[in-house]
Amino acid sequence: MTCSGRCRESQVRMHTRSLRWLLIGLLVTTLLALLWNRYGMNSVLEISAASVQDIVALDDRDAGGHSVASVARDDGKLVLDCTIGEAAEPICEMAIRLKNPPAGIDLSRYDTLLLALRYDAPPGQPLRFLIRNFNPAYSNPSDHASMKVEEIVFDPRRSRQPLEVRLSQFAVASWWSSERHLPVRYAGTEFDNVPVLSIATGENPARGVYRVALERIEFHGKLVPTDTFRLAVIGVWVLFILVHLAIDSAATRRQLLLSARSQASLRRLNAALRVQTQSVAKLACLDPLTGILNRNGLAEELVRLANDESDPLFPLSLVFLDIDHFKRINDRYGHNTGDEVIKNVVNIVKDNIQKRDLFARWGGEEFLLVFPGTQASEARLIAERLRELIAEDEPASGLRVTSSFGVAEWLPGEELTQSIARADSAMYRAKELGRNRVETEPA
C-alpha cells in the first residue's frame, strides 16, 4: 500500500468517527429539545382583577326582560351578581374587555384554559365561558354581536378547582352561527384576535339568584407551538442529512476520479450499477403508496397477457376510475388522510375483481382497470358494482367518498392509447353529469 493510499484510509476513518460523534450529539440534542418542549418552554397568560381595566355587566333588560346583572371588584376577584327574572331569553353576563376592537389578543398559541372561580346558583344551572374573536372578514368594530362567539358550557360545582379546559373543546355557538351565513372557511373556531372574554349564565336559566366570583383566568401554551417546534427539529435533521450527503457526494466524486485509472475498478463499478438498475426497474413497476401496478407495470402485464396464448385477450374493456372531489379532501383534511382514502378505495377494488384483471394507478386519484375477455356491457356492470361498494363503504375514518367511472372497449385495429383516451373521456363525462356514476364511451 502506498503512502497516498494510507493517507486516504486514515481520512476515511477520521471522517467516519467525526460523523458518528456528530450524529450522537444531534440525537442527544434532539431528545433534550423535545423533552424541553414537552415539559418546559411554557407560556402563561394570566387575567385577573388586577390586570383587567374594563368589565361590563350585561342582562336582558334592553330586550324587555327583568333580569338584573351587576359587576364589582371584591377582595381581588371579579364578581358577577345576577337575579334572573321573567324574560323571553333571560341572561346575565360579565364581559371582560381585553382590547378595543378591531384589536385583540392572539390566543391561538395557547392550548389550555384554567378557570379559578366560585359559583353560586340554583341547582342544575350551568355557566358558559365565551371567547369572542374579531375577524374583519365578518366583524364590525361598532357591532359587539358581530364577533364570533366560541363557548363551552360547564358547571364549576361539579369539577375540581381550578377548572382545566382544552381550547379544542370550545365550539362556535350555534345560536351565533344560525344568525349568520358565513363561508365554510370561517365555520371553525378562531382564537387569533380576541378582544373580549365573557362569563354568562346558561341558555334559558331558571329564575333565581346567581353569583360568580372569578379569581383568575389563565391561558397555558408553549413559547413555540409543538407542531412548529417539531417541524423545526425535522428541518435541522433534513439540513444535516443534506450537508452530509453533499460532503459524502464530494468525497465519492474524488475517490471516483482517483480510481478512474483502474479499468478493473471501473468494470466492477459498472457491473454494480447494472445490478442496481435492474433492482430499481423491478420496483418501478409498482405504485409505492398502494402496491398496485403503475403505468410501467401495466404495460408489462399487457405484453405478458398478449403473449399468453392459453387465454384469449379480446374482447378487452378499459375502465377509468376517479375519486370524486379528491382535491377538496386533501385541502381540508391533509395529504395523510388523502392517502388513506386512496388506499381504502384500492382495497375495495382489489377485493372485487378477478385475478386476471389488471388494476393500475394512473396518476393521483385516477386508476385504470383492464378486463381481458370482457365486453363493454359486462365491464359497465362491474364498474357499477364497484361504484356502489365505494359509495356505501364506511371507513374507520368516517370519511365516505364517491367515484366516477368511464368505460370503453378496445376495438380491433385501434391503438391502445386511443381506447384509453375514450375511457378517460367517458369518465370526465360522468363527472360533468354529476359524479358518482358510470358512463360508457360508444364504439
Image: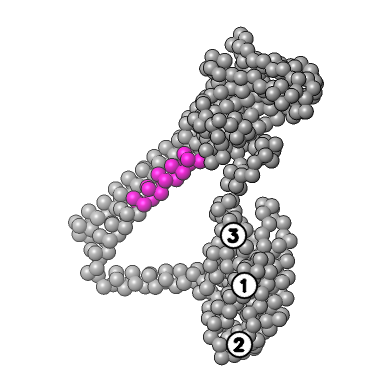
Discs 3, 1 touching: Cβ within 8 Å: no
* Magenta region, main secondary structure: helix
Mark 2–mark 3 distance (CA, rounded to whole Å): 31 Å
Q: Which mark is residue 61?
A: none
Q: Is residue 121 visible?
A: no
Which of the two discs, 2 and 1, sits closer to the camera?
1
**At numbered mark 3, what does the secondary structure look like: helix, strand or loop?**
helix
Question: Up-down: is 232 above or below 165?
Answer: below
Q: Inspect the magenta stretch and tell me whether residue 54 lies in it.
A: no
**Number of residues whose C-alpha sits closer than 10 Å to that of mark 3, classed few (under 14), some (14–19) or many (20 or more):** some
Q: Which residue is mark 1?
A: 429
Q: Which numbered disc flags the more N-terminal residue, 2 or 1? A: 2
Residue furthest to the left in view is 3
Q: Is residue 418 visible?
A: yes
Mark 3–mark 1 distance (CA, rounded to whole Å): 17 Å
Q: Which residue is mark 2?
A: 411
What residue is at 66 percent from the left and 78 percent from the top? 440
Q: Amino acid at mark 3?
A: Phe
**Number of residues whose C-alpha sits closer than 10 Å to that of mark 2, classed few (under 14), some (14–19) or many (20 or more):** some
* Residue nearer the viewer, 256 or 8: 256
**At numbered mark 1, what does the secondary structure look like: helix, strand or loop?**
helix
Quarter that holds the C terminus: bottom right
Part of the protein shown in magenta: 227-244
Q: Position of residue 13 (x, y in %)?
A: 30, 50
Q: Position of residue 395 (x, y in %)?
A: 69, 56
What residue is at 20 percent from the left and 59 percent from the top? 2
Q: Which residue is mark 3?
A: 326
Quarter that holds the N terminus: bottom left
What residue is at 52 percent from the left and 73 percent from the top? 295
